[in-house]
Amino acid sequence: MKKWIGRLLGGSEKETPVPEAPEQEQDEAQQDPELGALSREVDATYYRWLTAAAGYDASKELQHRILDGVRMLVHDPDSAAELVPRVPELIPKLMRSLMDENLSATELSRELAQDPVLVAEVIRESNSAYYRPLTPIKTLEAAVMMLGLNGVRMLLARIGLRPLVRMEVDGFARHALPIVWDQSEKCAFAASMLAPGMSASVFEAYLAGLMQNVGLIVAFRMAGRHCEGGRMPGSSEFGLRLLNISRQLSAVIAAHWDFPPQVAEAIVHAGRPSTPLAEALAHGDRVAKLRLLIDAEVIPADDPFVTSGLDNFQRRCLGKLGDLDD
């Protein structure tokens, strides 16, 4: 099961090497200065908002215990992957079919028609505000033509990872999980929109966006074992460290599940983008967090985070993300 992404993308059964963080990231206290003070502050603001109702002044000892627990999982991919749900068997089967670039809309529709739930999902997606069809789409083949091959791939990847949202969790994780997944979906869309301008793969950027918070979900579950009453350390410094080490854990799980190596590498290097894919992910992540903060009225749309921190295309991308919830 863990090899599903690799097989659907034509990979081998060999173990994917786990990407290593650069030396500067081994101590996750600092992010890359190249992303600038604005990016760091966006992350801090996002974490403070995410933990607002549950945050408290936790002891340094407790903070280190949580971070050390996440670090241990970074070096234990098997145990880390056990803490998140597995992907349904049907999704890899369909996505392997999608690797044929010559697959027609009719042939693809025939594959999807095997599952009525997927048929409904594809038609619903094609009628969403994101695609804005001129007239309502009612047939599967018309929906497939609207989404295109990449659009169907991205939808299936999202459906495949959706069990993450349905995990049985308690404590702070119960509050945080749906928000973190929302941010993941928005990040995936943003990264895929930004990818062409950075000469990165649209689909790989989308996969990286969906996967980049898996480690954070695991980290919040772990924190629940140490923090009583659904609480979470509210310190911005702790939050930045947790976001950074959790990104490394996400990369480890992505490699363990045999995602393309470049996807795992982009996740682990997103704090210090050194490849076009990592850069698309880093900017997509920031745009997605800003979208959530604006929608929650934590910051106004004319905040310097937006007006000074994003270029024109990134601001358009920010606006496009607003359509996802319509």
Image (spheres, grey):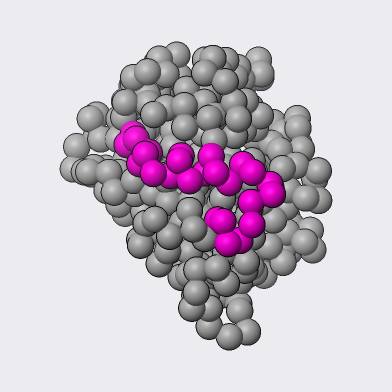
| Residue 187 among those drawn in magenta | no
Q: Position of residue 59 (x, y in %)?
A: 32, 29
Residue 42, can we see it? no
Q: Residue at x 78, y 50 (%)?
A: 196
- Say left or right for 275 vs 170: right
Residue 63 vertical position relative to residue 212 in the rendered view, above or below? above
Magenta span of residues: 84-108
Task: Please state if 303 lies on the left or on the right of 172 as rendered.
Answer: right
Q: What is the x, y in percent for residue 212?
A: 52, 38
43 above or below 21?
A: below
Along the viewing direction, whichever of 49 and 123 lies nearer the viewer: 123
Answer above or below: position of 203 versus 123: above
Q: Residue at x 56, y 51 (%)?
A: 154
Horizontal arrangement in the rendering, residue 260 relative to residue 278 (left or right) = left
Q: Residue at x 40, y 67 (%)?
A: 120
- Residue 271: x, y in percent? 64, 34
Residue in the image at 62% along x and 68% along y = 146
- Quadrant position of residue 312: bottom right
